[in-house]
Image (cartoon, helix red, strand yellow):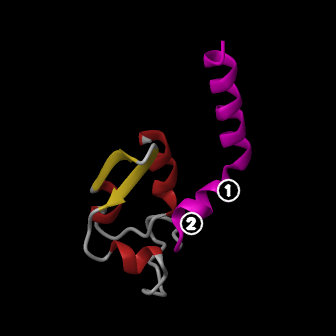
Amino acid sequence: MREARDMMSEFIPMNTGALCYNTRIFAENGRGVILYVQPYARFCYYGEKKRFNRDKHEKASAYWDKAMILSRRGFLTARVSDFIKNNGR
């Protein structure tokens, strides 16, 4: 989960870094969860704050998890494949 959070960071709107770096990572119902704890995280994620400052993160966007997946699809596929190969004995 930390790796996913780190890969998403360049897609998260950033001013001070509070949104990007204040997270909680946990499992819920058998799934990994990354919770962004800033009060305004929901507004940024859903694009309710329409203009993102891209001075620090050029790829900043709403739905940053989906943006990361689209951008790094090949990398993620390779990581899953490696995991299965190394742990699927």
The front one of 75 and 34 is 34
- The answer to which of marks 2 and 1 sits earlier in the sequence is 2
Q: Is residue 72 magenta?
A: yes
Mark 2–mark 1 distance (CA, rounded to whole Å)? 10 Å
Above-or-below relation of 1 to 35: above
Kind of element beneath mark 2: loop
Quadrant position of the C terminus in the picture: top right
Above-or-below relation of 14 to 77: below
Q: Is residue 78 magenta?
A: yes
Quadrant position of the N terminus in the picture: top left
Q: Residue furthest top?
A: 89
Q: Main secondary structure of the magenta part?
A: helix
Give the number of the mark in front: 2 or 1.
1
Q: Residue at x 38, y 75 (%)?
A: 42
In the picture, residue 36 is in which quadrant? Answer: bottom left
Amino acid type, mark 1: Ser
Q: Which residues are magenta?
A: 62-89
Above-or-below relation of 16 to 81: below
In the picture, residue 79 is in which quadrant? Answer: top right
Q: Residue at x 45, y 71 (%)?
A: 55
Residue that badge 1 annotates: 71
Verify CB contact (< 8 Å) between mark 2 and mark 1: yes
Would you say 85 lies left or right of 33 here? right
Would you say 75 lies left or right of 16 here? right
> Could you tell me residue 71's position as x and y percent?
67, 56
Amino acid type, mark 2: Lys
Kind of element beneath mark 1: helix
Q: How many marks?
A: 2
Q: Around disc 2, counting alpha carbons within 10 Å, would you say few (fewer than 14), some (14 to 19), or many (20 or more)? A: many
The front one of 42 and 21 is 42
> Could you tell me residue 18's position as x and y percent?
27, 63
Residue that badge 2 annotates: 59
